[in-house]
Amino acid sequence: MATLDVHHHIETHDHDDHGHEHHHGNFWTTYIFSEDHKVIAKQFLLTGMAWALIGGILSVLFRLQLGFPEANLSWLKPILGGWLTAEGKIDPDFYLALVTMHGTIMVFFVLTAGLSGTFSNFLIPLQIGARDMASGFMNMLSYWFFFLSSVIMFISLFISTGPAAGGWVIYPPLSALPQAIPGSGLGMTLWLVSMALFIVSSLLGSINYITTVINMRTVGMSFAKLPLTIWAFFLTAVIGILSFPVLFGAALLLIFDRSFGTSFYLSDIYIGGEALPNQGGSPILFQHLFWFLGHPEVYIVLLPALGITSEIIATNSRKPIFGYKAMVGSMLGIAILSFVVWAHHMFVTGMNPFLGSVFTLLTLIIAVPSAVKIFNYVTTLWKGNIRFTPAMLFSIGLVSFFLTGGITGLFLGNSAVDIQLHDTYFVVAHFHLVMGSASFFGMMAGVYHWFPKMFGRMMDEKLGYLHFWLTFIGVYLVFFPMHYIGIAGFPRRYYSWTAFETFSGFADLNMLVSVAAIITLAAQFVFLFNFIYHIFRGKLAPANPWNSTTLEWTTPRLPGHGNWPGEIPTVYRWPYDYSKPGSKEDFIPQHIPFSETPESNLPNENDQIKLDLGGAGVGGNKH
Amino acid sequence: MNEAVDFKIVEAPAKPISMNPKKFGMWLFIASVTMLFMALMSAYIVRRAEGNWVFYELPNIFGYSTILVILSSVCLQLAYFYRVNVTRANNLIVATFLLGIVFLAMQSLGMYQLLKEGHHFTGGNVSESFFFIFPWLHGLHIIGGLVYLIIVFITLRKGSFNKVQMEMCTTYWHFLGLLWLYLFVFLTLLR
């Protein structure tokens, strides 16, 4: 057994060297069907950005309808064509499709694939000291399944009955019956096919991430020395593996209901006065299955952003992260709790009130690890030598959104308060701040921070500041007023309220929200310019532009295939040795041994050296 | 970067524990398949508890197919034990493969018998629809396992013995056997 393991080890080593020396791939193997984790990460990033742009434009379209219900939009005719009514207004069916596709695209294609796919792929091998992912082939498949899924979802935007329109949660019976709304026809079928492929992609990715983090760490990289980013990606992947199959199961039964005539979710339905034959199904069952994925999905979206933020805030405060173990513990707590709170999305489905109170309790407990994280971010910033890079600003922005949006979560988590607030704009405001904007800011922070490692050049800071402030203020202007609109009882997903006397008083607030949304979208073009222009024309980046401690900054400016030209560095210390008292510089990278820094070692670290001195005499096999 | 200091390095950081990444990935895949079936089983339990649930006897053939799938697992395990003797191992893998095919045939027969007894996938009570999902979805995974068996067989034939590949295949096949055993008990006790 032991010999075989050693043998295997040698084999992989040979393979590494082989790949390293003879990597002269053509255009197709280098950039398109690449198995290199860095290229795959960039593919995910660019696809995710394209989707973010589409998702953002869709949101502005329906905000136009909500903010300016009387406006004539016929100037959009060249783009929207038949989706505008004769009076130049957005077709009500298309409005439903817009909100559905905005949700689907943002949650899955941007903040799951675009965020996890990019940064897990890019950072896991670089930060744990591995040559590549455990399986480059599976990694490539993961991207191409995502691409295929994207293509199908994109095509569904252009079919004559329109894309899926039952909301991103696709509750049956609305989504199960093609005769219910136009969007439940071919559009819904394409949605399901696309999501099935997306789940395959996500599972392939997650299996790879977990396998790599557990089995491919470099010498010395114990779990206690992992950067918090890696902890976050790791836990995200674990959540993904456990929750996405459940969505697959739910979607499978829905496909049978839609296309094969079963009645898993359907019962007692009349459409147009005609009774359907389906009997005995339970639509609530779908909600249970969906939210068993759906709630963990929130943390699949959020945890990577929190991990990225931990790294960036520590680096740019020039201070060790406050409470490393508490950070890991709270992420673990969030990951576990995320599986036992799903029914708080279903408080008003007629569930047992006792069950509701159990889920209320469990939901409110999530506030504890979340508060620990916010506390730790703030205490890391406290008295730090803060460098306000754009990445740092976006990270601080994330903390702000996470707090503002998290507090409203306490309202919504109460089953009693939820009776008033469910399905109103209060909910929209809550999850857009805590999950949407926070995760988006985490993603942006990551792009600004790791751009030098991805493309070997620097982005422009001034444009970064402009992008940050416009987006930050814009996001608050969009989502803060929504709390008031929601408390006033505005239901979400409604095409128009002008018919109701009660709601016409908020027309000005809705207009403000819509204007802010347009400005926020416009601000993203500043980023796009900054991003694309500086890929080609940016200042050349130094190897370690942020004076950071983690391993990715020990690679060359543009790490090649295999990441490190020589040996993989060995890790001796945790990743947050910033401003260590006595140290010459304000950061000590992870690969510097304690024996080289006697001036700053703590007593227990010195003990480690002494201890090993004795051991070295006996073993003496270091080299 | 490390070379310049090698005689000063006195700490010897431990190599993190690790296992074969591919095998590890297989276990994760098994975890996700388990979650898929757990989702469907919990849907089954929840829906059953709501009442309006038709009871019916499962055809005996599902019992026989359960014995068969256990036999096939035994065969594959023996093939793994006898892996040094390529001919013997190959014969056992062929036996496993054939048992797998017969298992699939018996599952199909069982479902066919249910159809003949008037329990249809569509149109009837939801309990009937639910039942068909399990042998069908499990069968799809068995087909995946059969493809894997062919791959292992070809590798063995070529003489390039790959222990990891064989172990992964055995793990997956045993998992599928156990999964069906569990599903069978579940569907028998919780009709």
Image (cartoon, coloured by chain):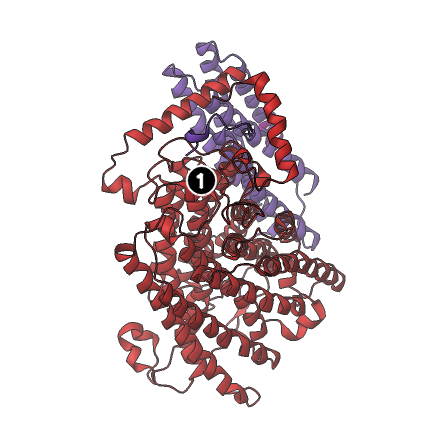
Dot 1 falls on which chain?
A
Quarter location, residue A49 = bottom left
Chain in purple colour = B
Q: Estimate the x, y position of residue A165 in percent, counting from the top left.
A: 45, 67
User: Which residue in the protein does label 1 denote?
Assistant: A125
* The N terminus of chain A, quarter of image: top right
Q: Estimate the x, y position of residue A166 in percent, counting from the top left.
A: 48, 66
Seen from the viewer's position, the closer of residues B164 and B20 is B20
Q: Estimate the x, y position of residue A578 in percent, counting from the top left.
A: 54, 49
Q: In this view, does B163 lie to the left or right of A153?
A: right
Regarding residue A259, the answer to whether it shows in the image is: yes
User: Magenta span: helix, strand or loop, mainly?
Assistant: helix
Q: Chain A is drawn in which colour?
A: red
Residue B62, magenta (yes or no)? yes
Quarter location, residue A401 = bottom right
Seen from the viewer's position, the closer of residues B11 and A530 is B11
| Residue drawn at the location 59% of the way across and 47% of the way down | B40
What's the magenta region? B58-65
